[in-house]
Amino acid sequence: MTTRRPVTPEPIPMVDVTAQYVRLKEELDAAVSTVLASGRFILGPNVQAFEEEAAQYLGVAHAVAVASGTDALHLALVAAGIGPGDEVITTPFTFIATAEAIRYVGARPVFVDIDPRTFNLDVQHLESALTPATRAVLPVHLFGQPADMGRITAFCDRHDLILIEDCAQSFGATWGDRQTGSLGDFGCFSFFPSKNLGGCGDGGLITTASAEQAEHLRALRNHGSRRYAHHDEIGFNSRLDELQAAILRVKLRHIEAFNDARRGAARRYGEWLGNLPLILPYEDPAGRHVYHQFTLLLSERDAVREKLTQADIASMIYYPLPLHRQIVFRQDYVGLSLPIVESVAQRCLSLPIYPEIGDARIERVAKTLQSAF
Ligand SMILES: *Cc1c(COP(=O)(O)O)cnc(C)c1O
């Protein structure tokens, strides 16, 4: 007689990058072996081809591949000539890298409160954040949802400010008929493995309409060199490598399918969770949200999260502490009160979402949430 063990369901992770590898194994293995056999690992044909293919997909004139999304932001700020004494208006509800990059160049991040529906920088605070030192605005298209680029570009035009988009979470998101990263002076992308277009290591990309700036960025990423063994300025070692570029070229061919699957998963979540006492992600009809994260607002967050954990379902709090409250920044923002972001940080909860998640896992997450209320 056989004894039946109770079926323990598989854990559900936040992201499953292995599922994507399994799906694209043949293409990825071939791309990687070709690079290995070629012996060219830095600034070779794959980086160039990836830059061209990404520029075409994003609808921009130039794309410059760099070593990470953080470097993309840093180099864009350097290229924009932003430095000590300058102020950059940005959001406190983002990954630390957004503000870190502003500090790398010696400038001051000026944090404004967020829109409680989109979680993006609230454009109604732009005017009051403006000072004679303001040089740039750095919106983040958080969780894959474009910021209000109509009003942000108008504000930047009116006040002659540089516009740098943090597109680390928004590869493939659109505003009107344009891709994020094509709307400002610079677009900064990350290919960290869990991003919508993710490599197998670190990587980043800067987009620009300016041929002159593209050339400058190519020098900056390679020790300030425009010509072999000649250095005109202090630059960086910040190149995307050939292996990552070859991998990203394969994945770029599938990005529409990945993002469609994320949107499909978000729709399924919405159908399951619509009747619960929580706030579902809002989609600004002016844009196409690509659901880097699927983020809810709910008051009993920590108790609900505990139920998910007990059911072996991952969840994350993006972000528990707004940037102006972080130890690294808070002494510079004493007395700054940003009530919306502070309230959102107490109530936000991100659920697992990735292209391969599938209806069965979504159903299990949803039923666990239903039973938690
Ligand atoms: C991931 C991320 C970055 C940094 O990208 P890395 O490639 O990890 O350096 C910057 N900004 C935001 C909003 C991000 O999510």
Image (cartoon, grey):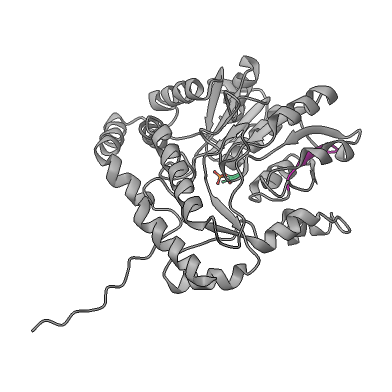
Q: Residue furthest top?
A: 211
Horizontal and vertical percent position of residue 57? 48, 24
Horizontal and vertical percent position of residue 26? 24, 38
Relative to residue 195, is residue 319 depicted above or below? below
Relative to residue 230, is residue 105 depicted above or below? below
Residue drawn at (44%, 62%), measured in percent from left and top? 365
The C terminus appears in which quarter of the rendering?
bottom right
- Using the rendered view, name the quadrant where residue 33 is placed: top left
**Span highlighted in magenta in the image:** 84-91
- 101 vs 355, left or right, is right
The N terminus appears in which quarter of the rendering?
bottom left
Q: Residue furthest right?
A: 132
Residue 90 is one of the magenta-drawn residues: yes
Horizontal and vertical percent position of residue 256? 42, 32
- 332 vs 267, left or right, is right
Q: Which residue is at the front of the view, 338 or 330? A: 338
Ligand 1 resides in the quarter of the picture at top right
Horizontal and vertical percent position of residue 135? 81, 31
Residue 121 is one of the magenta-drawn residues: no
Question: Is residue 237 visible in this depiction of the protein?
Answer: no
